[in-house]
Image (cartoon, helix red, strand yellow):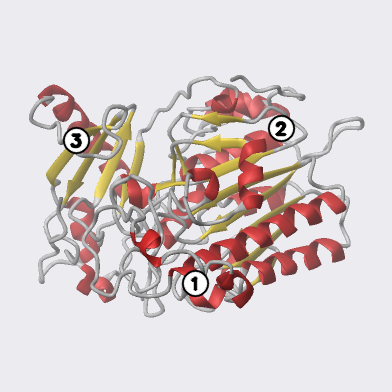
Amino acid sequence: MSFQRTSPPSAIGLGRGLRLGWLWVLFAIPHLSCARGQGEEPRPNVLIVLVDDVGYGDLGFMGHPIVRTPNLDKFAREGIRFEQFYAGGPNCSPSRASLLTGRAAYRAGVFSYIRNDTREMTLPESETTLAEVLLAEGYDTFHAGKWHLTRGNPEHGPQQHGFAQSVHKNATATELVGDFQDWLGKRETSNKPFFGLLALYETHDPVGDYAPDEFVRSYQDDSRQAALQLPTGRMPENKRARSGDPALYFGAISQMDSAFGSLLAGLEREGLRENTIILFASDNGPEHRLPESFGSPGALFGAKGHLYEGGIRIPAVLQWPKTWKVPSTVPEPLHFADVMPSLCDLAGVALPSPLTLDGVSFVPALDGMPLERISPLYWALWSSRSLPQFAMRAGDWKLLAAIDPVPANRKIIAHIKSAPFRHYELYNLADDPLETVDLKQSKPQVFQDLRKQMRAYHEEIMADAPSFDLEEQRAASGAGHALTK
């Protein structure tokens, strides 16, 4: 189904697929000034609602047989639902780095989740974020909830990367939506467009913290046995996994859905819903090792921490009521690295030049047209929970690879940057989305071509990547290598 666009595509869309050098500048000239001429349409507001550890099969509109998400289901029915949207990584920090920068997480210097004892790894201030670009173009910018991208005081991290206002607290979606609505109502610059990132904690452990009794009670009559039959990604699990109360997990999701409904209703009351671009997405696949790990990747293989589909393919929906009136689905494979150029494209905002991006604008895909990518889709997590630590998707083909564990006498960052790939797996996702049949032996030419492409792209990314000290994470080296198919 094609989309009914009620306003013309921006000139930035013409530059899709290009590295942001001088060609980008030529295409973006009409938007280089942030001034808006008289009579021009106001720029749209931009809002990202990012949920934590919600699996591909965790929501009603994605086919979950138990959980009730009426607000998200309606949002999906009326919006643009992405069938093959990928997070920037299989855990939180790399995924969020890719979302905000339009770059591969390793290129942006985020090699795994940023722990309290991290020595150096952080999202460098030299990185250009979506918030910084929109702030420079006259947007008010706001962040609430989880950050997990910089060392030191987490309250200051968002403000170092373009968020003029930030509310950092571990709270329910209901509370964080309330914080956003308070900020929105008190703005002295209400005539300006806004960019908000609501980084919700549901359904990260401990899920009970985000599951008020009223929502938990609504699931108490559901059969625990039915919950235990939900797909788990078919990966080895900790003995504690799914030993807890599934009502806590489902209640946390329903609480988040209720907050999302309140968010939409608030925008409607303020007359802001029509011209607000809203992207809802999860940051990675579901947790699968803990007592309340009742998340589901649907029928996909893998979960959080894995480079298989269940660890990186996520539920995602976009709405912009003013521009797209016809609901539909987008089958094109998309990546978090596409979000920054896409939202700037939709907002008519030019990105700085030169700037190397790994993503492209997905706006053509919203109109049913193919994307012109220079680079394949790419993921890396050297401390993954299963053998593959690197993955690349080119068309329907997905290649996975690993490196040997880090030797005791070698720096982790040096090993990640230069160690040879081994233990390849090759799948055709069009024919085999569950990644069951390894084709590297039966498709030798495809395998050889993709192997060369993967190595070349990895080396390009790692040439840009900072050489952070990662030694405090040495215990994670090879931790998941025993988990094979």
Q: Are marks 1 and 2 in contact (CB under 8 Å)?
A: no
Disc number lying in front (2 or 3)? 3
Give whichever of 431, 388 is nearer the camera.
431
Q: Secondary structure at mark 1?
A: helix
Q: Residue at x 86, y 66 (%)?
A: 186
Residue beneath disc 1: 248
Label whose residue precedes the other's in the sequence (2 or 3): 2
Where the N terminus falls, by quadrant?
top right
Q: Which mark is residue 426?
A: 3
Which three-letter amino acid code belongs to the residue tagged 3? Leu
Residue beneath disc 2: 31
Where in the figure is residue 273, as x and y percent of width and height? 79, 45
Q: Is residue 341 visible?
A: yes
Q: CA distance from mark 3 to mark 1?
A: 38 Å
Quarter-wise, where is residue 377 in the image? top left
Disc number lying in front (3 or 1)? 1
Q: CA distance from mark 1 to mark 2?
A: 48 Å
Give whichever of 216, 302 is nearer the camera.
216
Q: Secondary structure at mark 3?
A: strand
Q: Which mark is residue 436?
A: none
